[in-house]
Image (cartoon, helix red, strand yellow):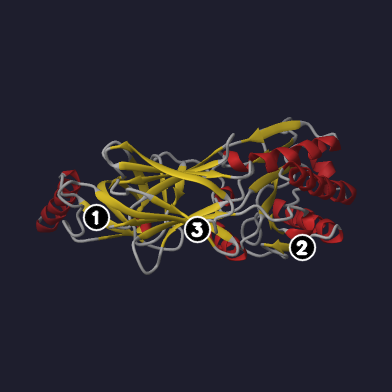
Amino acid sequence: MVKLGLLFLFVFETLFAFSQDSAWYARTTGKLPFIEYGIGDDRLGGAKMNYLDSDILVKVVDSFNTDYKIQLSKEHSAYIAKTSVILQQKGVARPPAHNTHLSGYCKVYGDAKSDYLAISLDERLPYHGFQLIDPSRIVIDLYGVTSNTNWISQLKTAKEIRNTWYEQIEDDVLRFTIELKHPQHWGYGIYYDSASRRLVVKVKRQPVIPDLHHIRIAIDAGHGGDNSGADGVTTKVLEKEYTLLIAKELQKTLIKAGAKEVFMTRTKDTSLSMPERILMLREYNPDLLVSIHLNSGGNDTVQGTSTFYRYIGFRPLSVAILNQLLTLGLKEYGNVGNFNFALSGPTEYPNTLVELAFLSNPDDEKRILSPKFRKAAAQKIYLGILEWLKQVR
């Protein structure tokens, strides 16, 4: 009875703590913490907003199973996995009395490879980045921040950033807009300087010569090891085996065509988690990624080829590849946007996922089993990359 009473007291105090204005605070931890829009879930996980850096201060206001609800600003909230934060003592590291932090000095500059926007802040706070097109822009919303910035220093060493400006869109949301010189988005990363509370947006430049001979291409063979993926409707062949065969055909095709570098996330039947793949690709820093998969439907009548993208600035690559795949005589299953697939999440490089055909459809399955078809499919993906590169010049 005493134990039950103590348990009730603990639950009551925890719920009470998260309901008060002086809520608990936490710091993000790990290599790939991310925030989500809500607590909904499906086979791809909850709808992600974006990845965050580590050691970012967040305000915890509620608890739901495996997630905390965090207050980003007065009007905005998000959800984060409990394993991605470390709770601080109640009342530790609270925002100042005016409930927002201040921005300071801003600078736009470049080095030999990239452009940067650096924003000084008095705390490491959460952010949300997204892409716009026509014209191409990167938008960064800083939550819990009020502008105390009175100028932006812009140096000629920046080669890809055309313009940068900021506006206080809400009392506690400060927005920075980065306008790019080229229509094509080549990627960006957001992080805090390890030695300070300065937020850095690293903008990838368009290659000086954007052709196959001057770019680094990454290929991901979907699934592998203990993750077999889908299986064939008649033969029960495994998706993981045939994505690797297609990926190797694409690798051979690209190397033969003179690609500067081709990186494979796996070259054999290896178990690789999505975080492992993302961190591997982050270290390699490709100019583009193609992830190869084979689809499966609820019934054997569904068939066709499709390509997927998450961010609007990366859509042209997915469209160019789909256009080429359709010349194989495959039915069109569509070009799918805002796709919440893990490898579509990184913003650092253009990427697309290719669902070549349906293993659950007898006709598509026959195609997939054919070495001639797999070689032709690799050729079409290569031609799609070439088509995309011609568009960005």
Disc 3 residue type?
Tyr
Q: CA distance from mark 2 to mark 1?
A: 47 Å
In the image, residue 30 above or below residue 41: below
Q: Name the element at disc 2.
A: loop
Would residue 368 appear left or right of 200 to someone viewing this image? Answer: right
In the image, residue 172 above or below residue 10: above
Q: CA distance from mark 2 to mark 3?
A: 28 Å
Between 37 and 315, the one nearer to me in the picture: 315
Location of mark 1 (residue): 25
Farthest residue to the front: give it.
156
Q: CA distance from mark 3 to mark 1?
A: 34 Å
Which mark is drawn over residue 260? 2
Q: Are marks 3 and 1 in contact (CB under 8 Å)?
A: no
Which quarter of the rendering shows the N terminus? bottom left
Between 38 and 300, the one nearer to me in the picture: 38
* Residue at the image position 54 percent from the left and 55 percent from the top: 158
- Which of discs 3 and 1 lies nearer the camera? The answer is 3
Disc 1 residue type?
Tyr
Location of mark 3 (residue): 109
Q: Name the element at disc 1.
A: strand
Image coordinates of residue 46 in percent, x first then y, are 45, 43
Farthest residue to the bottom: give it.
195
